[in-house]
Amino acid sequence: MIVAETIVDCRAAVAAAKADGKRVGFVPTMGALHDGHFSHIDRARRAEAFVAVSIFVNPTQFGAGEDLDAYPRPREADLDACRQRGVDLVFAPSVEQMYPDGPTGGRTSVHVAELPDTLCGRSRPEHFAGVCTVVAKLLNIVQPDVAYFGQKDYQQAAIVRRMVRDLDVPVEIVVGPTVREADGLAMSSRNAYLTDDERAQAVALSQALQLAADMIHNTHPPAGRVIEAMRAHLAGAAPLGEVDYIQIVDPDTLADVPATDRPVVAALAVRFPHARLIDNRVID
Ligand code: AMP
């Protein structure tokens, strides 16, 4: 496995693979790898001859007061895990390598209109510009044939798809399902922040989504009724959590929908004292 810390080395490794006629699958991550990340790595491994993973905690997608400094960075464990799963290339650049003029020193940023104005974008206003800019940079550096993202970050995947389409980036975007703990909690590098009590209550997010799916499958109630039921469940089952948002949205436009008689996405974010958790479910 090649570990590249510079853009030049990363490009050279990919160029050599392409010269051998290999297709390149790419899984961008912020590290602290878990089974959610591994699901994408394994899928890439099955589909492509060359698998690249990036590990980069991108400062420009964290807002002021968020967990940039505390974000876990278990570099050696991550590299070992990648080695074990047959990854060919890990691109693990420094902040200086990605942002030679400093994280705020660049003069170019990628903004997708409208899609970031809802869900997580409401409480994290700069987040998706940071995500799009770093993903655009990573796609330009790695130049993969296929890039893998998780449905766990539904809004992110929708925005990246749109960016790739609007900018004619020659890459196929594949979105894989959310990988969960046995009790239903969506895996996240941030789950490690939770206290035992918070962890026990965090299962309420996936329970609320299950409740929404059951209600919608049974009677297609107005979205407002579903949201109220989800809110009531969280109030009872997760008193340590403060709801950031609960929304029922169109799967493509992410606009709030009043009715649930067509496919929707139920999505929520809950702030616990030690971590803000998100989850979503596509309900057909
Ligand atoms: P992150 O390291 O959190 O930025 O995530 C890197 C990629 O893994 C993103 O495309 C995420 O959507 C995806 N991901 C994170 N958690 C999960 C999960 N529990 N299941 C599936 N994909 C995930």
Image (cartoon, rainbow, N blue to C red):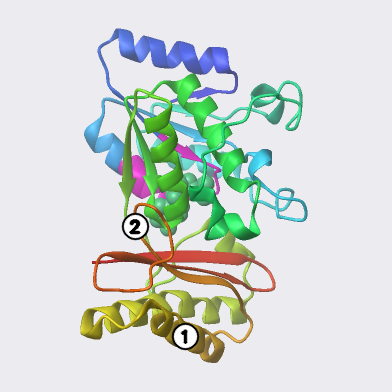
Q: Position of residue 135 (x, y in %)?
A: 51, 33
Q: Which residues are magenta?
A: 27-42
Question: Is residue 239 shown in magenta?
Answer: no
Q: Identity of the amino acid at label 2?
A: Pro
Q: Identity of the amino acid at label 1?
A: Glu
Q: Is mark 1 within 8 Å of ligand 1?
A: no
Helix, strand, or loop for circle 2? loop
Say which quarter of the image contains residue 181.
bottom left
Is 137 situated above or below 216? above
Helix, strand, or loop for circle 1? helix
Is 151 situated above or below 247? above
In this orientation, does residue 228 appear? yes
Is 130 situated above or below 153? above
Q: Position of residue 7 (x, y in %)?
A: 56, 17
- Name the residue tied to disc 1: 228
Is 142 situated above or below 241? above
- Name the residue tied to disc 2: 251
Q: Is mark 2 within 8 Å of ligand 1?
A: no
Instruction: State the residue at coordinates (76%, 26%).
Output: 105
Question: Is residue 40 shown in magenta?
Answer: yes
In this orientation, does residue 35 appear? no
Q: Residues within 10 Å of mark 2 (few under 14, many from 20)?
A: many
Image position of 87 (left or right of 125): left
C-alpha distance separating marks 2 and 1? 20 Å
Image position of 218 (left or right of 153): left
Image position of 279 (left or right of 125): left
Between 49 and 123, the residue placed more toward the observer is: 123
N-term-proximal mark, 2 vs 1:
1
Q: Position of residue 65 (x, y in %)?
A: 77, 55
Looking at the rendered image, the quarter that the N terminus falls into is top left
Between 244 and 85, the residue placed more toward the observer is: 244
